[in-house]
Image (cartoon, rainbow, N blue to C red):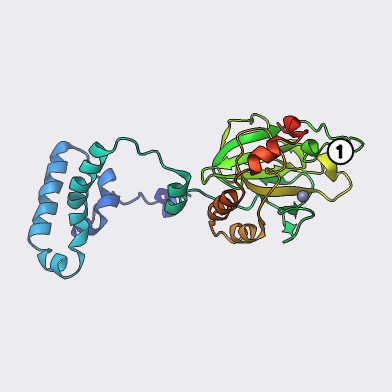
Amino acid sequence: MAFGQVGGRRPEPVVVHYRDAAVNEELVVPHRWPSARRALQWAVLVLTLASGVLTGCASSSSAAPPAVPETAVPTAAPTSTVGTSTVPSPASATAAGPVRHVFPAAGKPASYGTDHHDYPATDIFAACGSAAVSPVDGVIVHWRADDPYEAAADNPAYRGGRSAAVLGDDGVRYYLSHFESVEPGLGVGSRVDAGDRLGTVGRSGNAAAVDCHIHFGLSPDCPAREWSVRRGVIWPAPYLDDWRNARNTSPADEIRAWAAAHPTACADAAAEPTAADAG
Ligand SMILES: [Zn+2]
């Protein structure tokens, strides 16, 4: 296994390829500082090579790498000292592209449609008990570990059964419901990464007579309790297509446009008689 035991021979001492030092410096240095004296010798050697033998190479091709640290210092210093309030907005976070997105049903083949009854959302059908994961880096803003749904009452606030919503770092709220079980230790306020397990695919809520699936909705976050925005306002299928193919596409632009076109949506939803149960 260990390379040092192959053929019973001792491994060759870690002799640095000094001729390649200018190229392999970053790889070699951590293993080659037995003493400050050796370090000094190294520095002298590198400087000698850089200023003498390698001047021709530097001018013809790779003059840029040594210059990068020097130019980076003066540009970084002013911005760090001037900056006062640099809290990134969801818009800037999206533009920078750091927020990760993944397909929310992990591990098993899953299928979903481009349509949904009554309102924009989709149902992702997957094996009962397989993992439902957070589709985004974000914070849990809705968490229902129990299943109070009763068919006779058909309270729309409980139709999702065991469910979760994650407010993504891109400003979009991602809602997943009908879990068979929820992941222990999580709750409102928990920080999750894209791909973190939220629960298992099931048929809680009003899905008892349907195949196991995740109801999946995309929406803007609402400040008050409600369910009718959270369940979904735009069509998720194009984003699911991208995430399943490892393309990191955010619905943030479409959600912002929807919110701008529906400025009273959250207030209207919170005014529903059953909104107080939405939790
Ligand atoms: Zn659904």
Q: Is residue 71 left or right of residue 95?
A: left
Q: Residue at x 52, y 49 (%)?
A: 100
What is the three-letter code of the residue carrying label 1? Asp
Q: Is residue 50 left or right of residue 96?
A: left
Q: Name the image quarter holding the C terminus.
A: top right
Work out whether residue 9 or residue 232 is closer to the camera in this orientation and state it.
232
Q: Residue at x 86, y 50 (%)?
A: 210
Residue 18: percent from left, percent from top:
19, 56
Displayed quadrant of residue 227: top right
Residue 101: percent from left, percent from top:
56, 51
Ligand 1 within 8 Å of disc 1? The answer is no
Q: Is residue 50 left or right of residue 202?
A: left
Work out whether residue 35 or residue 219 is closer to the camera in this orientation and state it.
219
Q: Which residue is mark 1?
A: 154
Work out whether residue 108 or residue 153 is closer to the camera in this orientation and state it.
153
Work out whether residue 33 or residue 254 is closer to the camera in this orientation and state it.
254
Q: Is residue 91 left or right of residue 59?
A: right
